[in-house]
């Protein structure tokens, strides 16, 4: 099974981040996503909008994200009539992501382009370290788990479509 990001590769920390004043974690996460997106744009991978990155069972992968990333992703709720399972992402509708600004790191680094091979792994390692550091500095539990776990907890906690 392939994973969007590998839990065992999260040890590198950016020493500059410890000098950044602690601010709201979600704002920090969005800043980190913005930096990541800039690096991805520089690598210029091709996306043919196949939607395969969001159809987990069909393409044998699992999207992992932290609890705080899941909170950001669900901050405006789930799409209407969402089905929560491990097979696919409820935010994908008609082959497109409906949570593009809030989508987690694991989605941002994933591309099918063979010329991008190795870049996604390197960027995952670098930016997961930054996310972990932001969690630590805001004393927020990391709680890194598959999307379906976070979404079930969200629905059980009263969130929903
Ligand atoms: S959040 Fe968007 S990009 Fe990520 S798996 Fe869901 S639909 Fe796909």
Image (cartoon, rainbow, N blue to C red):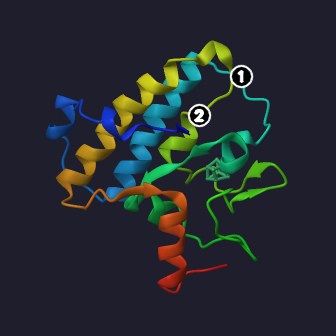
Residue 66 on image: x %, y %: 39, 55
Look at the image and tell me in which quarter the N terminus lies.
top right
Residue 66 appears in the figure: yes
Please tell me whether residue 76 is drawn above or below residue 119 in the rendered image.
below
The quadrant where residue 140 appears: bottom left
Q: Is residue 89 left or right of residue 27?
A: right
* Image x and y of residue 105, in percent: 48, 43
Crowding at mark 1 (Cα within 10 Å: few <14, some 14-19, many 20+): few
Residue furthest bottom in the image = 158
Residue 22 visible in the shown view: no
Q: Which residue is located at x 71 percent, y 71 percent?
A: 83
Whether disc 2's CB lies below 8 Å from ligand 1 is answered: yes
Q: Secondary structure at mark 1?
A: loop
Q: Which mark is residue 16?
A: none
Q: Residue at x 26, y 53 (%)?
A: 135
Residue occupied by mark 2: 110
Residue where numbered disc 1 is placed: 46
């Amino acid at each position: 099974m392939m994973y969007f990001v590998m839990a065992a590769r999260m040890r590198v920390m950016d020493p500059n981040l410890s000098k950044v004043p602690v601010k709201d974690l979600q704002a920090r996460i969005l800043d980190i996503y913005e930096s990541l997106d800039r690096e991805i744009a520089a690598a210029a991978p091709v996306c043919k909008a196949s939607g395969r990155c969001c159809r987990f069972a069909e393409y044998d992968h699992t999207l992992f994200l932290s609890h705080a990333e899941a909170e950001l992703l669900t901050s405006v709720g789930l799409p209407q009539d969402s089905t929560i399972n491990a097979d696919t992402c409820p935010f994908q509708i008609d082959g497109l992501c409906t949570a593009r600004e809030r989508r987690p790191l694991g989605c941002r680094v994933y591309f099918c382009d063979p010329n991008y091979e190795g870049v996604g792994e390197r960027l995952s390692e670098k930016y997961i370290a930054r996310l972990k550091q932001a969690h630590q500095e805001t004393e927020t539990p990391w709680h890194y788990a598959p999307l379906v776990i976070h979404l079930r907890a969200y629905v059980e906690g009263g969130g929903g479509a």
